[in-house]
Every structure is written in structure tokens, then in C-alpha cells.
Image (spheres, coloured by chain):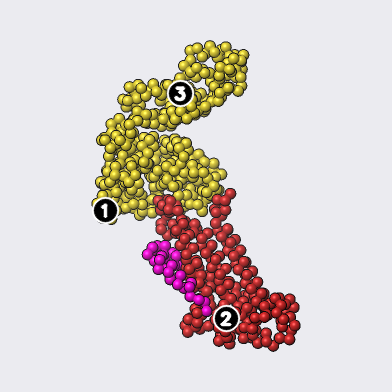
Chain colours: A yellow, B red
């Protein structure tokens, strides 16, 4: 495996394109195929989401790639090479594999789990150890967890290990079967965001299976909507899918709330934020009041000397002579510029807040997002036809 | 247990039953033994040395038969793991062996293997098959599908999946089976004396002792201690080979 040999230091082996050519899977003599004449190409380094109702053949289609399901007819090629010509076990070691139930080996430590494929490939111990540590850090886990057993980790941590394990030998292609499906909504959102950030860095070719259209829109560069019988209903970018569903089936599947779903295609940074009236501890309140006159946000935001937000000042706070060190109202939801717009709205609604402070990567205040900004955006014609901003996927 | 004694008589010449039988009769003059006291300390002190050889024989019988049983049952489990259709028939076959009464088993084997240690080991091993096989199969069946799927998807071959994933995960159940099999073998091995296989049975089935019980109590206590010791060793092995299970508890 020369690709992995050359690049285990960095984190980007050349990704390979994956191509289905009339790929068909039929079980036994059944009349209806599980996957019927599937033709699609996933360009190298892109995330292709296979989405559809249960029983539509999306998982089967994904499994054709690593031959955990064998083709009946047609072909699947990786980087131009047919998977049919490869030894299945050898082939699978070059394809990352993440499943919903994670499937970590309970009897192996986290480090051993992550080192599974490198060990199969005969890497030296030092190299496996270095790679394991690197991957734990890359997936946001404490390298000390390497000594633990899977049962000692939370579900979210286990799924991160699952991703780290799949990335271990730096495979050019990754298969992910509902990887975040079994995780609670909040942790799922975080894992999704982290994976997008990670993918922006490593640029693998990813086949991602889900039944959740929102997840598909959020994760995919391209989305393949499948319908029962393993037929491809539409293969398009998320924006195309939302703006021009190919037929009634896709339209139904995408849902009536298409405008709202467009929020999933945007980052907080893509929208014009309001400027926060800033206040510093010890500052004269009169000064702050003056600032409020011209501000869109009716409350001043208390920040420290590094411009990290601390909380909102209330009328009572402003009644004093100078700005107090402890603001009356807590900060509430804190958003990141890179957060997906839909999640930001959810955070606002969940926090029962009108306003949320938005910070940059260093945690410094960038602006304020309000429910009003979002509803104005949704009402504007831009939300319906602004193809350009939507097609350009913002990536970290 | 007069019926057992009666059964033992035809075999008495072969084993060492007869020896103690006669010994017992000639030492009738000792006061404690003549009475029906539960335990005679003087006799015990004097005769404890005579338990050494039977105890070692007993250990030998248990170790050899459990190891033989493990080897066979484990192989059967591996075969049945690959060929599903064999599971039922193998379970049935080992089950039938388990139901044959031990004395009948000894007599049935007598024309083929004669009497002696080997015959006893064959019978004892046959009894362990059902327990070990059943547990090994349960252990293999309990391996989560997701773990198997992940292993396959990462490029482990079937053989690697078996030895690196399925068997390690089935180890707790396999050792649990070994523990049950070993403890019950310690008990059944006391019948070895009827097939001339020696062991602690020699000290229990002396043929004469309805009133004299000291020998039975000592032999019984040694057997119990032995079962306990074997169980402890296997428990330690179970713990040692499955550190991840301890991790789960913390």
C-alpha cells in the first residue's frame, strides 16, 4: 500500500474517485433488485451522501464498494480500478469503514482498536503508536484514552474512536453507514461539525449513508437520493436538490420546509451579523448607555480585555455608576462563526434567547445573531434563489 | 449405599477396593472404628498418608479428562461455528453422551478399552463435552454482530476474525464452561474406582464402611477442596485473560 506508506506523517493521502457502473445487486431469485443499475461517480475528495427511506438499498450500495456485499452485475471502480479484481480483505484495508453501532473490539484498548488496520498492514510498532496518538488528537480525544477499553468511553467518544480507527491507515476512501445515527442529537450535531472540519483538512472520498435528509444536506457535497428497489432518484448538490427536486418522490422526501433546510447549507459567518454594543468592567455606565442609542441590540454585552464575551448587562446593571464585574444575565447560547446556520437557530430557540453572541476561533466577539436576522433572511428573495452562496459550501 | 457396594464387588479384584476392604475387616479391634462415631481422629492421623497417591491420581484423572474434553469440544465448536447445520446434531450427540450413567459407561467400554485409567479418562472427557461445547457456542454466538461487521469491513480475514476477535470475546464463556466441567469431573471421578482407575474413590467405596465414616469424610473433604482449588485457578485464568471485563465494571 504505497499511498499509506508515503503519507502517514501528514493527513492527506490522495483520495480516489469512486464510480458505480450499472452496479446491480440481486439477492437470490427475487424479482426486485436491492440495487438496480446504479450509475454515479463520486469525485475524489468529496462527500457523497446516499439517502433514502429504509429498504431503498443505500447501505447495500455502499457495501458494494468494499465487497462486504458482492456485485451481481456491473462494476464499482476506485481510482479507475475495479473492486472485482481485488482480494476482498486487501481491498477493505484500503477503505475506511465506520458503522452506526461502531463495533469497537471490546477486548482491545482504544489504541489497539485504532491500530487494527496498520497492524494488519504490518506497520512497525513505533509507527502504529505515533499514528494512534495523532489520530486521537485529530478526532478530539485525549491521547490518554488510548489505554482504556471501549466500555469505559461514552457513546460519542466511541464513535470518534470509530472514525479514528477508520482513518488509521490513511485510506483514500471512507464508507460511513449512519455513523452518527445512534448518538443523542446534541452530541450528533457536534460530531457532524467536527467531521466536516476534519474532512476539510483530510479531503477523503466519503460515501455516507443516512436516512435523515437534514443530515444529508448538511454533510454532503453531493446527495444521491434513492428510492425503493435500489433506484437512483436524483444525484445532485444539496442546493440543487432543495431548489429543483427531480420528481415528486424527491420533493416529498426533501420535505415542505425546503427554505428552512437551506439554513443547513449556511454558516453563521455567511450572514451579516449585528454589531454588539460592548461594555468593559469598570466602564462608566453612561458611556455604555450612549452606545446603546445607535445599536441594533438593546442590551450591552460585557467582554473582558481580550474581547471574550462574559454576559449581558441588564437595566439593573446599568443603574449602577460603573459596569459591574458580574453581569445580571448569563451569556446564553454562544455561537461560533463556523456553526451551521440551522444549528445556530436551534441553539437560539433552545436557549429561549433573542440574541446570541458569535465568536471567532479565538473566542473573541464577532457580532450578534438574532432570531430577527434569520427570519429576515428567510423572507428575503435571496433565501429562495441565491444559488451562488448555497452551492459554494462554506468549509472551515 | 449398598447397591453401589454390590456393583463394586465384581470389580473389586481389579481395583484396590479389595485391599482396604480386607484391611478394614482385620482392624476391627480398634475401639473408635468399631463404634459408629462420625470421625476418628486417631485413625485419621495414622492413615492420612495413604491419601497421597489417590489424591494425585484423582488430580491426574481430572486434568487429563478436562483437557481432552476441551480439545474435542473446542474443535467441535469451531466446526459447528463454520457449518451452521452441524450445530443441532453436535449438541444432540454430546447431550446423549451426557445422559449415559457413568457405571454403565464403564461397563460398555470394558470390552473395547478394558479397565483402568484410560477408560476412566474417556468417560470423564465424554461428560465434559456437552458443557464445554454448549458454553463455547454460546460465547461465539454472543459476539456482537457489529463487532464482526467492523472486523470484516476493516479487512480481517475469516480466520483472523475467529482468532483475534471471536475467540477472545468468547473466552469468558469458554472458561465458565471449563469451570463447571472441572468441578463436576472432580465429583464424577470418585467413581473411577469401579473401573480400576484409582483416585479418591478408593477411599470412599471401601466396601465395608456403613458404620465407619472417617475415610469417607476425609476423601470427600479432599475432593471438595480439590474442586474448590481448580475452580479458583480457572477463575484466576478467566480474570487474567479478560482484563476488559474488569474495566467495564469500573
The spot of residue A163 in percent (x, y) is 45, 44
Instruction: Chain letter for mark 2, please.
Output: B
- Give the alpha-carbon distance from disc 3 to disc 1, as whole Å: 54 Å
Marks 3/2 same chain: no
Residue holding disc 1: A30
Q: Secondary structure at mark 3?
A: strand
Q: Which residues are magenta?
A: B74-103
Residue drawn at (71%, 77%), measured in percent from left and top?
B37
Is A119 on the left or on the right of A228, as rendered?
A: right
Instruction: Classify B38 as above or below A121.
Output: below
Instruction: Chain letter for mark 1, please.
Output: A
In the rendered view of the protein, which quadrant contains the C terminus of chain A? Answer: top left
Quarter of the figure with residue A179:
top left
Is A130 on the left or on the right of A379, as rendered?
A: right
Residue holding disc 2: B4
Check disc 1: other Cα within 10 Å, few if <14, some if 14-19, many if 20+: few
Amino acid at each position: 500500500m504505497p499511498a499509506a506508506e508515503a503519507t502517514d506523517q501528514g493527513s492527506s493521502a490522495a483520495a480516489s474517485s469512486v464510480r458505480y457502473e450499472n452496479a446491480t445487486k440481486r439477492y437470490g431469485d427475487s424479482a426486485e433488485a436491492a440495487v438496480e443499475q446504479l450509475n454515479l461517480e463520486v469525485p475524489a475528495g468529496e462527500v457523497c451522501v446516499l439517502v433514502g427511506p429504509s429498504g431503498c438499498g443505500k447501505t447495500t450500495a455502499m457495501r458494494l464498494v468494499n465487497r462486504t456485499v458482492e456485485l451481481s452485475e456491473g462494476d464499482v471502480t476506485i481510482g479507475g480500478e475495479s473492486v472485482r479484481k481485488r482480494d476482498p480483505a486487501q481491498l477493505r484495508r484500503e477503505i475506511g469503514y465506520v458503522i452506526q453501532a461502531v463495533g469497537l473490539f471490546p477486548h482491545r484498548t482504544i489504541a489497539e482498536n485504532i491500530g487494527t488496520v496498520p497492524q494488519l498492514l504490518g506497520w512497525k510498532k513505533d509507527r502504529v503508536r505515533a499514528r494512534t496518538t495523532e489520530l486521537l488528537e485529530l478526532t478530539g480525544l485525549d491521547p490518554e484514552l488510548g489505554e482504556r477499553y471501549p466500555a469505559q468511553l461514552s457513546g460519542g467518544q466511541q464513535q470518534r474512536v470509530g472514525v479514528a480507527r477508520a482513518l488509521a491507515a490513511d485510506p483514500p476512501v471512507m464508507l460511513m453507514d449512519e455513523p452518527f445515527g445512534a448518538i443523542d442529537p446534541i452530541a450528533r450535531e457536534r460530531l457532524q461539525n467536527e467531521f466536516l472540519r476534519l474532512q476539510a483538512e483530510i479531503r477523503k472520498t466519503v460515501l455516507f449513508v443516512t436516512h435523515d435528509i437534514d443530515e444529508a444536506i448538511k454533510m454532503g457535497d453531493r446527495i444521491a437520493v434513492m428510492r425503493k428497489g435500489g433506484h437512483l432518484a436524483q444525484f445532485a448538490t444539496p442546493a440543487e436538490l432543495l431548489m429543483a427536486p427531480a420528481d415528486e418522490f424527491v420533493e416529498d422526501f426533501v420535505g415542505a420546509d425546503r427554505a428552512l433546510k437551506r439554513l443547513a447549507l449556511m454558516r453563521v459567518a455567511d450572514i451579516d451579523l449585528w454589531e454588539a454594543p460592548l461594555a468593559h468592567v469598570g466602564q462608566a455606565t453612561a458611556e455604555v448607555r450612549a452606545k446603546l442609542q445607535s445599536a441594533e441590540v438593546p442590551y450591552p454585552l460585557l467582554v473582558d480585555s481580550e474581547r471574550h464575551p462574559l454576559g449581558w448587562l441588564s437595566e439593573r446593571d446599568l443603574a449602577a455608576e460603573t459596569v459591574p464585574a458580574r453581569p445580571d444575565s448569563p451569556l446564553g447560547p454562544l455561537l461560533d462563526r463556523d456553526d451551521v446556520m440551522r444549528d445556530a437557530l436551534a441553539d437560539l430557540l433552545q436557549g429561549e434567547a433573542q440574541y446570541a453572541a458569535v465568536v471567532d476561533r479565538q473566542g473573541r466577539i464577532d457580532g450578534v445573531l438574532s432570531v430577527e436576522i434569520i427570519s429576515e433572511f428567510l423572507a428575503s428573495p435571496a433565501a429562495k434563489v441565491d444559488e451562488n452562496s448555497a452551492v459554494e459550501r462554506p468549509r472551515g | 449405599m449398598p447397591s453401589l457396594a454390590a456393583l463394586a464387588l465384581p470389580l473389586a479384584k481389579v481395583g484396590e477396593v479389595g485391599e482396604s476392604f480386607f484391611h478394614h475387616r482385620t482392624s476391627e479391634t480398634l475401639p473408635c472404628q468399631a463404634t459408629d462415631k462420625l470421625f476418628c481422629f486417631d485413625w485419621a492421623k495414622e492413615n492420612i498418608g495413604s491419601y497421597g497417591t489417590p489424591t494425585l491420581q484423582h488430580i491426574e484423572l481430572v486434568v487429563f479428562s478436562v483437557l481432552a474434553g476441551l480439545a474435542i469440544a473446542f474443535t467441535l465448536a469451531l466446526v459447528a461455528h463454520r457449518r451452521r447445520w452441524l450445530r443441532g446434531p453436535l449438541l444432540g450427540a454430546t447431550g446423549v453422551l451426557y445422559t449415559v450413567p457413568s457405571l454403565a459407561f464403564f461397563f460398555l467400554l470394558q470390552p473395547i478399552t478394558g479397565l483402568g485409567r484410560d477408560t476412566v479418562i474417556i468417560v470423564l472427557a465424554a461428560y465434559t463435552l456437552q458443557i464445554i461445547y454448549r458454553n463455547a457456542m454460546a460465547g461465539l454466538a454472543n459476539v456482537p454482530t457489529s463487532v464482526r461487521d467492523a472486523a470484516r469491513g476493516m479487512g480481517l480475514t475469516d480466520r483472523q476474525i475467529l482468532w483475534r476477535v471471536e475467540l477472545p470475546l468468547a473466552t469468558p464463556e469458554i472458561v465458565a464452561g471449563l469451570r463447571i466441567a472441572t468441578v463436576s469431573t472432580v465429583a464424577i471421578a470418585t467413581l473411577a474406582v469401579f473401573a480400576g482407575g484409582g483416585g479418591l474413590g478408593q477411599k470412599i467405596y471401601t466396601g465395608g464402611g456403613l458404620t465407619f465414616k472417617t475415610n469417607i469424610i476425609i476423601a470427600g473433604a479432599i475432593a471438595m477442596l480439590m474442586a474448590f482449588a481448580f475452580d479458583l485457578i480457572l477463575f484466576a485464568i478467566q480474570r487474567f485473560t479478560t482484563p476488559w471485563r474488569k474495566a467495564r465494571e469500573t
